[in-house]
């Protein structure tokens, strides 16, 4: 995988915080294209919340849209991104909406 030349692959991340930051900064194209590999790495490392985030992000992209182009469910992706942001900052997730 090479989303950006200076960007490490997710399997090079050694902590959940690094994996969370990687997921948050990966392009949607990368998440879609490399989904199987990303899921494998997240399963092997036991980063269950990362798997939940990946699923939420991909569901958000595929979700039906309103007339103005916004998705119907904005809360689920906001919660998932908030959890990843906390983990990327070295904090524990609040598990709101879980």
Image (cartoon, rainbow, N blue to C red):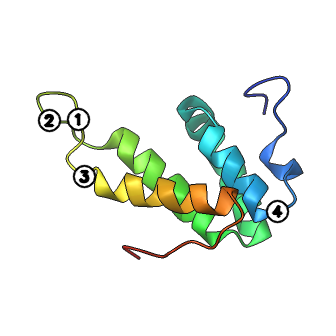
Distance, label 4 to label 3, CA atoms, is 30 Å
Dot 2 crowding, Cα within 10 Å, few <14, some 14–19, many 20+: few
Q: Nearer the viewer, residue 14 or 11?
A: 14
Dot 3 crowding, Cα within 10 Å, few <14, some 14–19, many 20+: few
Q: Quadrant of residue 2?
A: top right
Residue visible at 66% across and 68% down in the picture: 91
The residue tagged 2 is: 66
Q: State which tag comes first along the sequence, 3 or 2.
A: 2
Q: Which mark is residue 70?
A: 1
The residue tagged 3 is: 73
Q: Are marks 4 and 3 in contact (CB under 8 Å)?
A: no
- Secondary structure of the residue carrying tag 1 is loop
- Secondary structure of the residue carrying tag 2 is loop
Distance, label 4 to label 2, CA atoms, is 38 Å
Q: Residue 15: where, in percent of width, then height?
A: 82, 62
Q: State which tag comes first along the sequence, 4 or 2.
A: 4
């Amino acid at each position: 995988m090479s989303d950006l030349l200076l960007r490490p692959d997710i399997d090079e991340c050694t902590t959940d915080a690094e994996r969370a930051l990687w997921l948050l900064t990966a392009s949607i194209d990368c998440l879609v294209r490399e989904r199987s590999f990303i899921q494998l790495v997240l399963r092997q490392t036991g980063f269950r919340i990362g798997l939940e985030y990946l699923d939420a992000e991909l569901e958000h992209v595929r979700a039906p849209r309103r007339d103005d182009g916004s998705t119907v469910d904005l809360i689920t992706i906001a919660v998932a991104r908030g959890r990843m942001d906390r983990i990327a900052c070295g904090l524990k997730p609040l598990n709101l909406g879980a």
